[in-house]
Image (cartoon, grey):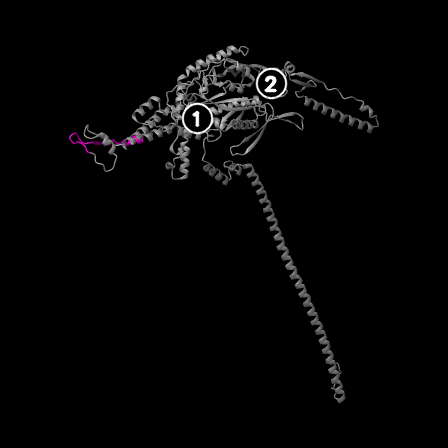
């Protein structure tokens, strides 16, 4: 990798400006041909597809310079497919970094995408990728955003404003010695962009060259207009701005703190601040770096001493001794030495290693005025390209350039067809000279039923029928259109042509899936660029976000998630201050989720997830993520509430069921009791009847005995009267 060891110091800004302007001129000359092609490609995409000479020839023939722009819809279709969804990143910790923090950094990348209007940025990059052969995204720090806390953002850059080292061969320009971003500003624009350098800009001088190559394309009413076409661009009050990026070796110090286990990489400014940091050595062993921790330790020791003193007093009182003896014992002094980190380095409790690392340096200039320089916290250029057809140079080829010939054929064919249609409706007549009065002939020829005299000796007028256009002309135009779509990785169903779709739903889904393979080679270039964007953004975030920061991310399912980084918390047990989600330390790798920006058939995807849910492979949350429900959290909360209510209802129903069983049991018991009472009553009644019957029987027997006795007495009396008492009768029978 080439690396510039710049001998230009900030203290010599004049040399830096001169060197940058010289590089700009050399790089600009090298790319002149490429820049002309890019402008022509853009003109083709926007409808300026005839040269002035071609238009003049057509007009002389009586033909219209028709433009049937097949390039524009093809580019729009490809762009729409590649940028259908938000790019997804997975950040993985390197070495012993925190996995939780890696997830937070992934969320930060999504947050950066949202606040930068990333969808528009990526769409513009992809558009330039197809039309200019190269799309560019710049990663930068905006220190004034978020109420002065700063933000890391992205923006698209016009490839025509970027000048790259001509010797670069790498697709991502890693080997470029310099990258210069240069464009024209009005001085008012420059002063709004750099308000702190207003005086320098006001007094700056600049050689203004608009650097807009001429392509010779005609300007039509329906074609796109460029500023130079309508005289909007003048050299008055314009100034050329420069942002120059190059790589330098920066001295660093890698420090390892034995007492904390922390490892840090510090630049010169950070190193000076690091040496001056205070520390406290307790008992010659324990090292604390926070004054609050020292105060808490002192309070704990004091409380411990007071507890020991109270125990001693109680023991003396129990033994009959004098408690004042214990109270007179002073608290032992705690040996605390306040030092600096520089002292700790001398005591070898902090190990230091001097190294040099590669970093990107950025210098800003307006005209001949030097503004500032800055060392970026990354070794990768923040100007990230998505290169279409790499030519082993910084000047790639675009898809539009590859199909311009087919587009010109379509335009010429359509112009010929229209011209033929026009001429075929206007009949051509060959008239022998002198055979008719031409004035009378021209006046009466179009009238119905008219008779025009002519001299047969000179010959009769002859009607000439135009030859029909061959059918191949129409089929070739369609073939050229298909060739354009094929070059851009499209097929008819992607363009919305339902007539070519299969009859079955699953066949259509399969065809759509396989059809995307054509465009995935293009997608690989875009994904490589977006991965690099994330790799550059992470160290910028680590440098900028040093304090507590709360941010909100819109998830792909439209739900909102809140995150916090660098939150300082106090451990209730130890009293030590810990930083929650500390993103300022650690190194992280970025993995781009391939195909994340491609469109997905949401119905097919939802069907797949519903099937997995029914089989118990996933839960309802994963299914909801694949729907278009906005308030997923609210839906899930309401579902939980409904589930709780259903559970309570089922529990109540079980309780009611149990109560019904108990009631039925009680009913049966009551019925049995009533029956028992009735039986007992019947038995009582029966006993009463029986007793009554027995009493009646006893009374009847007694009455019968009395009656018999009376009868016997009566008979005995009568016998006596009759003196007929039987022999042996004693009266006992």
Q: Which mark is residue 47?
A: none
Q: Is residue 224 magenta?
A: no
Position in image of residue 366 (x %, y %) = 51, 15
Badge 2: residue crowd in 10 Å (few <14, some 14–19, many ≥20): some
Q: CA distance from mark 2 to mark 1?
A: 48 Å
Residue under label 2: 256
Residue 7 visible to the viewer: no
The structure residue drawn at horizontal position 65% and vertical position 25%, both measured from the top left corner, is 577
Q: Is residue 472 magenta?
A: yes
Determine the residue positioned at 39% across, 24% down.
43
Q: Is residue 33 left or right of residue 118?
A: left
Number of numbered labels in the structure image: 2
Residue 127's label in the rendered image is: 1
Pick whichever, 674 or 442, lies toward us: 442
Extent of the magenta region = 453-475
Q: Is residue 730 above or below residue 585?
A: below
């Amino acid at each position: 990798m080439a690396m510039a060891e710049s001998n230009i110091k900030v203290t010599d800004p004049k040399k830096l400006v001169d060197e940058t302007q010289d590089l700009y001129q050399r790089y600009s000359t090298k790319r002149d041909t490429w820049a002309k092609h890019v402008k022509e490609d853009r003109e083709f995409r926007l409808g300026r597809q005839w040269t002035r000479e071609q238009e003049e020839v057509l007009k002389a023939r009586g033909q219209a310079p028709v433009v049937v722009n097949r390039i524009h819809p093809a580019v729009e279709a490809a762009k729409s497919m590649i940028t259908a969804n938000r790019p997804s990143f997975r950040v993985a910790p390197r070495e012993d970094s925190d996995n939780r923090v890696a997830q937070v950094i992934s969320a930060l990348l999504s947050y950066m995408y949202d606040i930068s209007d990333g969808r528009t940025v990526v769409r513009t990059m992809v558009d330039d990728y197809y039309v200019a052969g190269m799309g560019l995204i710049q990663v930068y720090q905006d220190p004034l955003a978020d109420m002065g806390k700063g933000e890391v953002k992205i923006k698209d850059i016009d490839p025509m404003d970027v000048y790259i080292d001509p010797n670069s061969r790498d697709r991502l320009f890693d080997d470029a010695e310099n990258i210069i971003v240069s464009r024209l500003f009005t001085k008012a624009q420059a002063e709004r962009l750099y308000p702190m350098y207003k005086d320098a800009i006001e007094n700056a001088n600049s050689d203004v060259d608009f650097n807009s190559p001429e392509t010779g394309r005609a300007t039509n009413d329906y074609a796109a207009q460029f500023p130079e076409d309508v005289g909007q661009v003048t050299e008055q009050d314009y100034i050329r701005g420069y942002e120059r990026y190059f790589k330098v070796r920066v001295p660093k110090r890698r420090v390892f703190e034995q007492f904390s286990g922390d490892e840090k990489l510090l630049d010169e400014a950070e190193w000076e601040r690091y040496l001056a940091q205070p520390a406290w050595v307790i008992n010659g062993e324990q090292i604390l770096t926070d004054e609050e921790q020292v105060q808490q330790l002192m309070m704990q020791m004091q409380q411990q001493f007071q507890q020991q003193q109270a125990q001693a007093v109680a023991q003396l009182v129990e033994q009959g001794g004098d408690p004042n003896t214990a109270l007179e014992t002073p608290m032992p002094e705690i040996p605390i030495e306040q030092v600096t980190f520089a002292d700790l380095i001398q005591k070898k409790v902090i190990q230091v290693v001097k190294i040099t690392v590669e970093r990107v340096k950025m210098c800003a200039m307006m005209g001949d005025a030097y503004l500032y320089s800055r060392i970026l916290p990354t070794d990768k250029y923040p100007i990230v390209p998505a290169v279409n057809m790499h030519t082993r140079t910084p000047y790639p080829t675009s898809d539009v350039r590859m199909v311009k010939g087919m587009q010109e054929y379509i335009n010429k064919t359509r112009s010929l067809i229209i011209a033929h249609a026009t001429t075929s409706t206007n009949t051509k007549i060959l008239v022998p000279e002198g055979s008719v009065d031409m004035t009378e002939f021209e006046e009466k020829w179009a009238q119905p039923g008219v008779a025009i005299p002519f001299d047969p000796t000179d010959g009769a007028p002859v009607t000439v029928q135009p030859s029909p256009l061959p059918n191949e002309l129409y089929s070739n135009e369609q073939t050229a259109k298909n060739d354009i779509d094929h070059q851009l990785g499209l097929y008819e169903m992607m363009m919305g042509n339902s007539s070519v779709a299969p009859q079955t739903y699953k066949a259509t889904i399969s065809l759509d899936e396989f059809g995307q393979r054509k465009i995935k080679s293009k997608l690989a270039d875009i994904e490589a660029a977006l991965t690099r964007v994330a790799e550059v953004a992470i160290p910028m975030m680590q440098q900028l976000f040093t304090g507590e920061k709360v941010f909100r991310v819109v998830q792909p399912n439209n739900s909102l998630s809140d995150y916090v980084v660098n939150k300082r918390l106090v451990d209730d047990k130890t009293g030590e201050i810990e930083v929650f989600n500390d993103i300022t330390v650690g190194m992280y790798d970025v993995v781009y989720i391939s195909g994340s920006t491609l469109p997905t058939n949401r119905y097919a995807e939802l069907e797949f997830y519903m099937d997995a849910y029914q089989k118990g492979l996933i839960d309802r949350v994963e299914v909801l993520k694949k729907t278009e429900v906005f308030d997923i959290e609210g839906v899930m909360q309401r579902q939980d509430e409904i589930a709780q209510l259903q559970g309570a209802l089922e529990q109540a129903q079980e309780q009611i069921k149990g109560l019904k069983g108990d009631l039925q049991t009680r009913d049966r018991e009551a019925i049995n009791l009533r029956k028992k009472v009735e039986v007992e009553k019947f038995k009582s009644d029966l006993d009463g009847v029986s007793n009554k019957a027995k009493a009646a029987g006893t009374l009847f027997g007694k009455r019968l005995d009395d009656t018999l006795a009376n009868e016997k007495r009566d008979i005995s009396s009568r016998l006596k009267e009759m003196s007929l008492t039987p022999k042996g009768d004693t009266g006992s029978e």
